[in-house]
């Protein structure tokens, strides 16, 4: 079974631009969570989607948004990029069913650099 | 702010020894506790998780919870150089979101 895929893997943008990152969960997984990882702050939760609905949201400004499609694929968007948005953005998927309820499988991440 | 705290390390142990990793959490209502391993340049992978009702052993790994003191530990027996990685502790409070610590770097020396 294919793992979580994220595109693009690397991205360079300049301040003020916007960016869209994509995540395809493992087949059959309906929950997708997004995290930001930086050396200073570690892994921080952005938001979680389940069946196209945002169920949980972390403490990030409104410039960070996301959505989930009917096939469970998810996108996150960051508008008006700031230097501090440079980070590794990780997506994780889960079935939220049975014995696998607690297992979140992470994708390889998208490395975003803001210049 | 509900926090998860870990010593950043590095924690250095010789091959074959027991590595002990700890994290503390502030949300007394937390019910699920997770340990992830992250190799340099890779994404986190789940090692094991426990609920508030008990410890768990899985092969060389044992996760323990001390609810009264609000800390979680991960013991790695017979440590191998391949265990060298950053270990992330995560706690789930209400909802599904995971609150991660910043990780402890473990170095197992041959």
Image (cartoon, rainbow, N blue to C red):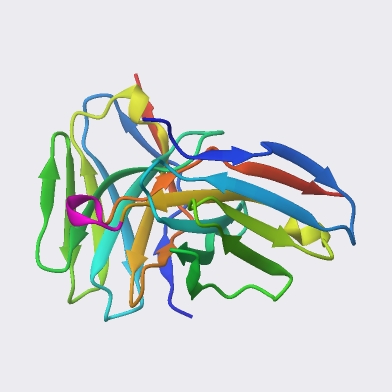
Check residue A98 for magenta coloring: yes
> What percent of the width, then of the height, locates residue B89?
36, 56
> What percent of the width, then of the height, locates residue A30?
40, 55
Q: Would you place residue A79 above or below residue A4 in this image?
A: below
Residue visible at 74% across and 58% down?
Answer: A85
Residue B4 appears left or right of A97: right
Which image quarter is the N terminus of chain A in? top left
Which contiguous range is marked in magenta? A96-101
Residue visible at 25% across and 65% down?
Answer: B32
Q: Would you place residue A21 above or below residue A53 in this image?
A: above
Residue visible at 9% across and 62% down?
Answer: B54
> What percent of the width, then of the height, locates residue B75?
21, 45
The one of A59 and B16 positioned closer to us in this rendering:
A59
User: Can the viewer see residue A86?
Assistant: no
Residue visible at 56% across and 33% down?
Answer: B41
User: Can the viewer see residue B4?
Assistant: yes
Check residue B69 for magenta coloring: no
Q: Would you place residue A58 above or below residue B39 in this image?
A: below
> What percent of the width, then of the height, locates residue B53?
10, 67
Q: Would you place residue A104 above or below residue B71 in this image?
A: above
């Amino acid at each position: 079974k294919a793992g979580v895929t994220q595109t693009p893997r690397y991205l360079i943008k300049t301040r003020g631009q916007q960016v869209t990152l994509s995540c395809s969960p493992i087949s059959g997984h309906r929950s997708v969570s997004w995290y930001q990882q930086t050396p200073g702050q570690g892994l921080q939760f952005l938001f979680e989607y389940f069946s196209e609905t945002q169920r949980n949201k972390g403490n990030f400004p409104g410039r960070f948004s996301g959505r989930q499609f009917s096939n469970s694929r998810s996108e996150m968007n960051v508008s008006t990029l700031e230097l501090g948005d440079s980070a590794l953005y990780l997506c994780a998927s889960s079935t939220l069913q049975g014995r696998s309820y607690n297992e979140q499988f992470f994708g390889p991440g998208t490395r975003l650099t803001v210049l | 702010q509900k926090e998860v705290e870990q010593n950043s390390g590095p924690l250095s142990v010789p091959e074959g020894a027991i590595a002990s990793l700890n994290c503390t959490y502030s949300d007394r209502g937390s019910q699920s506790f997770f340990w992830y391993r992250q190799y340099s340049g890779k994404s986190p992978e789940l090692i094991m998780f426990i609920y508030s009702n008990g410890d768990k052993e899985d092969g060389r790994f044992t996760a323990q919870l001390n609810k009264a003191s609000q800390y979680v530990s991960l013991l790695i027996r017979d440590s191998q150089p391949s265990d060298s990685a950053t270990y992330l502790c995560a706690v789930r409070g209400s909802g599904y979101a995971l609150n991660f610590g910043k990780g402890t770097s473990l170095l197992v020396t041959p």
